[in-house]
Image (tube, rainbow, N blue to C red):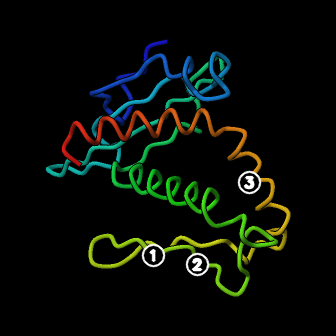
Amino acid sequence: MKIPTTLKHKPVIVSENYECVDGRFAYNSDAKGLSLGLAQWNDRGKVDISAKVWRHTGEKWSRQSEEMPLHRVLDLAILICRAKLFFQEEAYRHEKLYDASKPVIDRIGLQGDAMTVAVCTDNEYIDEDIKLFSQALGKDDELISERLRTLSRILKELGY
């Protein structure tokens, strides 16, 4: 299925077969494509690049398609990696999988400040939800790890 090029987001680099590789939803996904392109929020004379997940209901392109600035995509990747590391190396040390008195997992320096990574203790069901999250993370470990290894290889090729 071809990603539309007549909407406000202007695709430049695309993956039009994303539905075939969308994790456990592969071959049965409403996320039909990914694109990097010119952001829909661009003002005259100002151009930003964005990433977009293109969803299709089977009949039309969905309003649930998501567009994000590239730095947010990378921030989400950082958050995923830090969460995976927490569950891999730290969570098992705590009875509830986290320390309620110290919910902050890390502060990751970005642009002169830091992104705080923490367990959401405001969630009234956190004790149950963190166990479910941990189980789901474990269940999807093969899918996530494959993508992280690929990302690591490409980052090394880029010199990072």
Earlier residue among tags 1 and 3: 1
**35 up-or-down from 109: above or below:** above
Residue at 64% over, 59% down: 87
Q: Gap in Å between the C-alphas at discs 2 and 3?
A: 17 Å
Of residues 119 and 19, the one nearer the viewer is: 119
Q: Is residue 36 left or right of residue 22?
A: left
Task: Check residue 104 in the rendering and tell me which mark sits there, or answer none.
Answer: 2
Mark 3: which amino acid?
Phe
Task: Check residue 107 in the rendering and tell me which mark sits there, or answer none.
Answer: 1
Task: Check residue 133 in the rendering and tell me which mark sits there, or answer none.
Answer: 3
Please, what secondary structure does the residue beneath circle 1 have?
strand
- Image position, residue 53 (x, y; %): 49, 34
Mark 2: which amino acid?
Val
Q: Is residue 156 left or right of residue 59?
A: left
Q: Quadrant of residue 118?
A: bottom right
Q: Quadrant of residue 35?
A: top left
- Image position, residue 111 (x, y; %): 27, 72
